[in-house]
Amino acid sequence: MTATTERAVGSDVRRIDGPAKVRGLAPYAFEHEVDGTAVFVALVQSTAAKGRITSIDTSAAQALTGVLAVLTHENAPRLGDVADEVVVLQSDRVQYVGEPVAAVVAETSEVARDAAARVVVTYDAQTPDVELRTDRDDLYAPEQLMAGFETDSVIGDVDAALAAAPVGVDITYETPNQHNNPIEMHATVARWDGDVLRMWDANQGPHNLVPVITEAFGITEDRLHIVSPYVGGAFGSKAYTHVHQLIAGMAAKVTGRTVKLELTRPQMFTLVGHRTPTIQRLRLGAELDGTLTAISHEVVEHTSQNAEFAEQTATATRLMYAAPARRTTHRLARLDVPAPTIMRAPGETPGMYALESAMDELAVVLGIDPVELRLRNEPDRDPERDVPFSTRNLVACLRQGAERFGWAGRDPRPGVREDGRWLVGTGVAAATYPTRRRPSAARIEAVPGKPYVVSIDASDIGTGAWTALTQIAADALRVPMDRVDLRIGDSRLPKASGAGGSTGITSWGPAIMAAAEQLADRDIPAGGLTVTGEAGPGDEAEQYSSHAFGAHFAEVRVDRDSGEVRVPRMTGVFAAGRIINSTTGRSQFLGGMTMGLSMALHEESVLDRTHGHYANHDLAEYHIAANADVGEMDISWIDEVDDLHNPLGAKGIGEIGIVGSAAAIGNAYWHATGRRVRDLPITPDKYFR
Amino acid sequence: MDNQITLRVDGADTPLTVDTRTSLLDAMRERLGATSAKKGCDHGQCGACTVLLDGRRVNSCLVLAVTAEGQEVTTSDGLATGGTPHALHDAFVDHDAYQCGYCTPGQIASAAGVLAEAARGWPSAVTEDLVADATDLTDAEIRERMSGNLCRCAAYANIVPAVAEVAVEQGVRA
Ligand code: FES
Ligand code: FES
């Protein structure tokens, strides 16, 4: 190996996939197999939320020229034993509005859509139950939460501590249904080559899909090949297998053709998950000096008939602040809705919105600066697990953020700063996100005179993994980046964890380093040399509490005539371990913070209580932040290396940016107007309630 | 109903058969294999499909392919001349004005349209002087004019300086 003095990790190198992406030449899922031989799938969706199909008449659809097949529960191939939420076209049962009840395969997409509209389905429908309320008598405690967290945690006599506290708040916050809505709609191209199923698919890691798809089609792993080199955003919706991938596999099987199934934007609201709404009761008790004596965070949220998805909403509250008495609980209502799924920082995003809003409200009652209140409740160990933090730099984030934002000297009074029609305020909130790693393997092929081929079934959903992994490989091999030829996004590459839970870099990076280790000081024979390496969790998760931290500061302006809310500037400071690439890393924080702004001001999927569907199921009515919604974004980070957790010292940065962002904006809204909006989003009408 | 037409996309004429219902976007993506323009909604709501039609930006999902015959369709890919990227391509890479890259060709085609509109003095909702000969593409102007292109990765704060840099080069920003 050639020695190089320059380190790629930590530099600001540009994305290696950038030049292809800006011209539109990097192939996303739907853009494979463009030789004109592919055929197209269109879905027929249930108009009933609950009940049975009583008849399906496909004759008019079949009669159209160009229609190759119409799959229904009566004729579709039988699937293996897969989880209820991905069972599709197998029976007459319907469990949510929008569930696929038929799929048309046709020579063109126009004919497929036309034919789908001609399928006539009748239902024996029942009235759906989609309303989340805290007074439901069927709320239940799940066995455990997502990611294996305990459902409840209780330390000390919380009710007594709350009753005895000289100062306290008792407030309920609500967050709405939200949808991931990556701009690339989920798409699958599928073909059976003999008994091998090939898929070009938009997902967060091909290996994530292998167990369900092999089981569904009764094939062994070596007979499934999933390719996914470029993915147009995901935010959780592309993490798991959904029904469309199985429909594509069935349609390809029945027709013997290459099929393309691209969801429509409205279908993105029912078939690929959503973030559960939450109702969260926060009770905080404190001494007059702001020292917390009790924290209680009780969550009510929903799941579906066909899946138990128990979002870990209050788990960040278990470690954020010191307090002797503490309690978190989660209760679910099982409703007639599509299955929820993970959406950027599931748990932390809604949960920290509530906790950080409550901390602001407590600071107001106490008359203590909200930055100072957080500093006074900094724990020196994980307050529930009683283990040390591997690194915890929340205090540094708050101090640096206050400095950069110009927080000092802030007048705490609400509703007193005017600029013409505009009321102006500022707010702060803290952030945290767990640091984890998952087992992954990597392979390196070395041939004298050629770049090292580094292979791992990692996934770049916009995170910058193509570039960051190339940097890590270059440093591990001690060569410049152009001597690394990275291969990712293919189920035939060494098995790696999916892109999710901010675990990509902490899982894949060490696997590549372990493979490179195998080559250290070895001569490469003329015929080449192939090595593999594996890495995964050790006992660090038992020994330490490992989390990224951050602080958000926001300025908000509210038009007192229209209620319009603007966010002219935000500052975010993060302590998230080693940042592999300062350019793409900054973009991860930026994207998260802006999605938090979007959550604060715009996002809400409205469930129709009568019919059980999402009423605003497109991008004209489900608003996400547009360019003009975003102002100056000041992003920085603390120098931090967490090598107690993993050999890279990284923590993962895909999600922490969104955590707390909405709370900072809500808190600034209060400071501007003197009004608290405790149910997101903060739309203009709420100013006039 | 099938129609024989010839589409001119990024300088290449290709005869093809389309349904009367085929959008320009689907004609490119599903028939020509020209996949630079992306589909993010198919309803004119996201801007991912933005192309220039005879130099003006349009959502190609809202244009019927049969009506695009005889017009010059330019995607982000077509903005490059031979192997040389357009200044917007370089600026987007330099400013990391994207993440997943899926909205990006639409952003870039749209930005090319914005630069041309500013040079001709076309006002936007935030333009103060409605009769000026040319528009000064301030940050506020760029934010407003680029708001038809949604980016769920939310690279907006990087898109603005990328477009601004090229606007300066082209003399439409002070
Ligand atoms: S695909 Fe045309 S605007 Fe969204
Ligand atoms: S870069 Fe992903 S949607 Fe814009």
Image: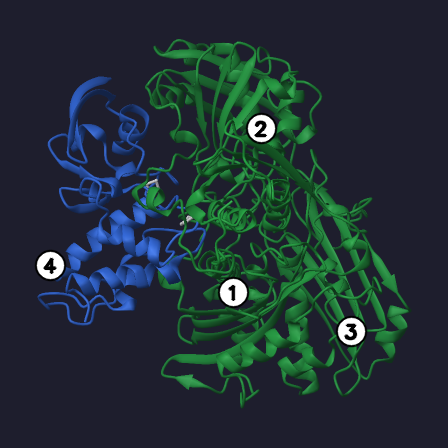
Q: Quadrant of residue B164?
A: bottom left
Q: Chain of mark 2?
A: A
Question: Chain A appears what colour?
Answer: green
Q: Amino acid at mark 2?
A: Val
Going from N to C along the chain, the mark reached first, 2 or 3, is 2
Q: Amino acid at mark 1?
A: Ile
Q: Secondary structure at mark 2?
A: helix
The residue lying at 42 percent from left, 23 percent from top is A117
- Tell me the quadrant of ligand 1: top left
Q: Secondary structure at mark 4?
A: loop
| Residue A379 vertical position relative to residue A654 in the rendered view, above or below | below
In space, the residues marked 2 and 4 are separated at their CA atoms by 49 Å
The residue lying at 20 percent from left, 51 percent from top is B113
Q: Can you identify the residue that label 1 sits on? A: A682
| Residue B57 vertical position relative to residue A105 in the rendered view, above or below | below
Q: Can you identify the residue that label 3 sits on? A: A380
Asked if labels 1 and 2 share a chain, the reply is yes
Q: Secondary structure at mark 1?
A: loop
* Left or right placement of residue A161 versus residue A243 in this view: right
Q: Chain of mark 1?
A: A
* Label annotation for residue A243: 2
Does mark 3's beta carbon lie closer than 8 Å to ligand 2?
A: no
Which one is closest to the eye, mark 3 or mark 4?
Answer: 3
Q: Amino acid at mark 3?
A: Asp
Going from N to C along the chain, the mark reached first, 1 or 2, is 2
Which one is closest to the eye, mark 4 or mark 1?
Answer: 4
Which one is closest to the eye, mark 1 or mark 2?
Answer: 2
Going from N to C along the chain, the mark reached first, 1 or 3, is 3
* Left or right placement of residue A597 versus residue A547 in this view: left
